[in-house]
Amino acid sequence: MFSIFSSLSLMPRIETDRLVLREMKMRDAASLFSYCSDPAVSRYVLWDTYKYPSQARDYIRSVRRQYRQGFPGTFAIELKETGRLIGTVGFMWINPEHRSCEVGYSLSRREWNKGYATEALKALNRYAFNDLHLNRVEAQYDVMNPASGRVMEKAGMHYEGTLRQRLNNKGRFVDVNIYAILQKDFQHLKEDNTHAAL
Ligand SMILES: CC(C)(COP(=O)(O)OP(=O)(O)OC[C@H]1O[C@@H](n2cnc3c(N)ncnc32)[C@H](O)[C@@H]1OP(=O)(O)O)[C@@H](O)C(=O)NCCC(=O)NCCS
């Protein structure tokens, strides 16, 4: 489907200090359900709080269908220490023509504020620039969810603006902040190897 992926393993195993990013498997369903059924996790995202375990299985099936179609959509975030899924990070879309993409992430509430989302996002951005050779990675978040914006900042992304009432989330029109990092920004960060964004 996407020629830029042809020479790559579609869903590589990506290791960071504390995490493994890998393809989602059906065995992740119970862990996925345990945190996607938490309304605090789904509050600022576009999917609804899970009510039934079958929703986790359906989601994993749809992600695996995307893999088969050649799209590296969603990675599982596995905690090395336990081997368990604690969240997901991935591409909402990739535009091969413009070499751009949008990324998103969510984590189990038990694991918030330990730096895991930032660690996972940095790893995904490295994959996007070094392996997929994309030029622009963007992300957006509901302005009421500043923790997500902080993750983007810590990953070296730049604020580009606020789009008023861009989305309707659970019956509420919401303003969203857009952040992005370009290949040239990423190269600058790499040259300045003291920068924590890498
Ligand atoms: C947003 C989310 C992914 C952050 O994950 P995380 O692993 O806690 O993120 P990190 O620990 O890497 O960083 C969180 C940062 O936000 C800060 N933060 C937390 N709550 C905050 C708040 N209410 N206001 C401002 N900053 C906040 C933390 O202090 C930390 O910054 P610091 O390192 O400078 O102290 C997590 O809260 C989540 O999964 N939320 C539900 C799903 C979601 O909203 N996804 C994003 C959709 S755009």
Image (cartoon, helix red, strand yellow):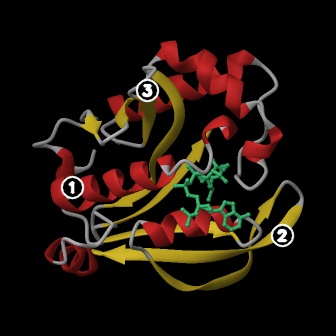
Q: Residue 165 location in percent, x, y? A: 77, 77
Q: Which residue is mark 3?
A: 24
> What is the three-letter code of the residue carrying label 1?
Leu
Q: Is mark 3 within 8 Å of ligand 1?
A: no
Image height of 67 relative to 33, above or below: below
Residue drawn at 70 percent across, 52 percent down: 45
Residue at the farthest top position: 27
Residue at the farthest left position: 7
Q: Residues within 10 Å of mark 2 (few under 14, many from 20)?
A: few
Query: Helix, strand or loop at disc 2?
Result: strand
- Image quadrant of residue 35? top right
Mark 3 → mark 1, Cα distance in angstroms: 19 Å
Quadrant for ligand 1 reads bottom right
Q: Which mark is residue 173?
A: 2
Image height of 164 relative to 23, above or below: below
Residue at the farthest right position: 171
> What is the three-letter code of the residue carrying label 3?
Met
- Image quadrant of residue 194? bottom left
Q: Are marks 2 and 1 in contact (CB under 8 Å)?
A: no
Name the quadrant of the N terminus. Answer: top left
Residue drawn at 24 percent across, 75 percent down: 189
Query: Helix, strand or loop at disc 3?
Result: loop
Image height of 150 relative to 119, above or below: below
Q: Which mark is residue 141?
A: none
Q: Which mark is residue 132?
A: 1
> What is the three-letter code of the residue carrying label 2?
Phe
Q: Is residue 68 left or right of residue 30?
A: left
Q: Residues within 10 Å of mark 1 (few under 14, many from 20)?
A: some
